[in-house]
Image: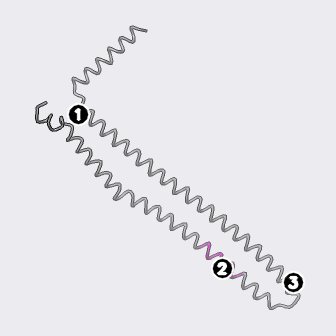
């Protein structure tokens, strides 16, 4: 190698800088396009959960309103009707409690499922990101090794390895 090339970092700076720029560009693209995609996907899932909760709240209000109307109508009936009204109110309360319990259980199940789905999507994204980082690291390492290992160095390494195998074979 000539003196100006050695002074400039031995010729290793240019590949390193180009790979660093490429990595920065890929990181920017992921930041600019990948993260908004995942944020949008998680936002949509959150919206779906909120819509489900709103629907359940509306159904709960409708059930409560129906029970209130039933109580008001039954209050106007005579003594015999009062007995039937009390039985109907008890049944309505039981049904309301059962409906509320069912709705809560369904909402909790749906929330747990959505949380699992979000966690799975997050884990997938992290695995993809890790795989991409590994791929880029291997690519950068290969580039660095290609720049460092010349034919002479490669020949010496092969000779040294084969010599070690011969010595090991002789010892055996």
Query: Which numbered marker is on residue 83?
Result: 3
Q: Check residue 113 for magenta coloring.
A: no
Please tell me in which quadrant of the rendered image residue 75 appears.
bottom right
Q: Is residue 49 left or right of residue 12?
A: right
Q: Any mark on residue 62, and which?
A: 2
Give x and y (percent) for residue 92: 76, 77
Picture coordinates of residue 135, whole percent (x, y): 36, 42
Calculate the distance from the C-alpha at mark 2 to the C-alpha at mark 1: 74 Å
Q: Residues within 10 Å of mark 3 (few under 14, many from 20)?
A: few
- The residue that label 1 is drawn on is 147
- Going from the N terminus, do you reach mark 3 or mark 2 first? 2
Q: Residue 61: image x %, image y %?
A: 65, 78
Seen as rendered, the residue at the extreme left is 3
Residue under the point 73% across and 74% down: 96
Whichever of labels 2 and 1 marks the residue nearer the N terminus, that label is 2
Residues shaded magenta: 55-66
Tell us which disc is closer to us: 2 or 1.
1
Residue 78 pos. (x, y %): 86, 91
Q: Secondary structure at mark 3?
A: helix
> Do callouts 2 and 1 mark residues in contact (Cβ within 8 Å)?
no
- Please rate how many residues cluster around mark 2, counting C-alpha atoms within 10 Å: few if below 14, some from 14 to 19, many from 20: few
Give the spatial CA distance, label 3 vs label 2. Answer: 25 Å
Helix, strand or loop for disc 1: helix
């Amino acid at each position: 190698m000539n003196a100006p090339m050695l002074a400039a970092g031995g010729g290793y700076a240019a590949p390193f800088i180009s790979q660093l720029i490429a990595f920065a560009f890929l990181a920017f693209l992921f930041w600019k396009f990948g993260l908004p995609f995942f944020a949008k996907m998680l936002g949509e899932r959150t919206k779906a959960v909120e819509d489900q909760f709103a629907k359940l709240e509306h159904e709960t209000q409708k059930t409560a309103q129906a029970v209130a109307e039933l109580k008001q109508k039954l209050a106007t009936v005579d003594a015999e009707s009062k007995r039937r009204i009390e039985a109907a109110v008890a049944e309505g309360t039981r049904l309301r409690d059962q409906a509320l319990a069912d709705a809560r259980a369904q909402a909790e199940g749906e929330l747990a499922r959505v949380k699992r789905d979000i966690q799975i999507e997050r884990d997938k994204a992290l695995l993809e990101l890790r795989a991409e980082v590994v791929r880029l690291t291997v690519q950068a390492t290969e580039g660095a090794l290609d720049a460092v290992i010349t034919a002479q160095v490669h020949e010496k390494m092969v000779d040294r390895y084969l010599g070690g195998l011969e010595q090991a074979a002789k010892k055996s």
